[in-house]
Amino acid sequence: MKRPRFIPDNFTLILIGLVVLASVLPVSGDAAVAADWLTNLAIALLFFLHGAKLPTQAVVAGLAHWRLHGLVFACTFLLFPAIGLALRPVLEPAIGPDLYRGMLFLCALPATVQSAIAFTSIARGNVAAAICSAATSSLVGIFVTPLLVLLMLGAAVQSMPLGEAIGKITVQLMVPFLAGQLSRRWIGSWVETNKAWLKYVDQGSIYLVIYTAFSRAVVEGIWNTLPLWQLASLTVACCVLLAVILVMVNFIARRLRFSVEDRITILFAGSKKSLASGVPMAQVLFSGAAMGTLLLPLMLFHQIQLMVCAVLAKRYARRPETP
């Protein structure tokens, strides 16, 4: 049976269930320490598999369409943060400083891979360019996102020197990713053959981070300090951010005279943010109860962007065939 358009997918429903579970049965004490170690190992494995899955040749070949990729990267890593900072006078009073920092963290993340490609395909856009843009954005984000977070959030990031923060990012994210790239010649075909069940490694690492992060937040009293009206305001803020970025990305792509197919690719690759990359990066960059609050905007935005982009993709798909 086909799932109704606005019903969240199973992945999102499990995330919601984990937040509820953490609210009722938070992990704490020695169990929390063990959960943190397990989470860090799962994140290292996640980025190792990402490196093993990403064909370097495809990324290099796809960079030939430099105008399209340059615009997608500009929207992802420049336009998004600029809009997030420009909306500060409106967003910060409405949702509070902690959730606003979560919005800025969201703005610094790379684009999604799977959903950007899927929506581009449904909308009959330039799928080859979407594959290259989304995959390269995920790779570039490992380097760019932590720097953007350090620039925009500063003191909200773990209290460590810049060099130490970059070193931690390198060890936990970049080294496993590069190890995966180097091992592609031996395990690349095996990873491709078994990608159907290896996706559960991706999801499992995200589940672990969400559960441990919200457990810490619950122990510190997040639900005593975060009223329902603030969650409602956050939902509106995510909708506003997505609406602004969709309008601006579409406007810029039209002004630069891209074809319809390329505009579709730019719209879906340049307006979406990756939960799969954001959750592990939050685990590395942030600590304590603050991480639970910082992840709330990303979780909400993730579901909203899926619902809105599904509607847009179907509308584009109904356009007449061009000769």
Image (cartoon, grey):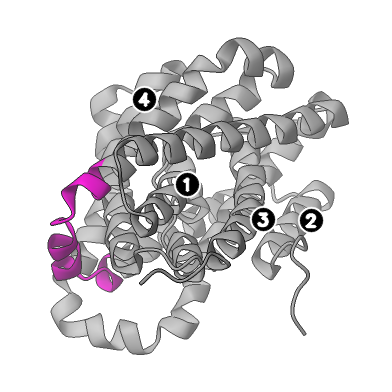
Q: Which residue is mark 4?
A: 150
Q: Between tags 2 and 4, which lies in front? A: 4
Q: Taking 188 as reference, is 60 above or below it?
A: above
Q: Between tags 3 and 4, which lies in front? A: 3
Tag 1: amino acid: Gly
Alpha-carbon distance for marks 2 and 1?
21 Å
**Magenta residues?**
51-70
Q: Are marks 2 and 4 in contact (CB under 8 Å)?
A: no
Q: Which mark is residue 218?
A: none
254 lies left or right of 275: left
Alpha-carbon distance for marks 3 and 4?
31 Å
* Of the image marks 3 and 2, the number of the one nearer the N terminus: 2
As for residue 297 lying within the magenta part, the answer is no
Q: Are marks 3 and 2 in contact (CB under 8 Å)?
A: no
| Residue 23, horizontal then vertical, whole percent | 80, 47
Q: Which mark is residue 278?
A: 1
Q: Between tags 2 and 1, which lies in front? A: 1
Can you tell which quarter of the image residue 233 is in? top right
Tag 4: amino acid: Leu
* Of the image marks 2 and 4, the number of the one nearer the N terminus: 2
| Residue 18, horizontal then vertical, whole percent | 73, 57
> Which residue is painted at 74% across and 65% down in the image?
5
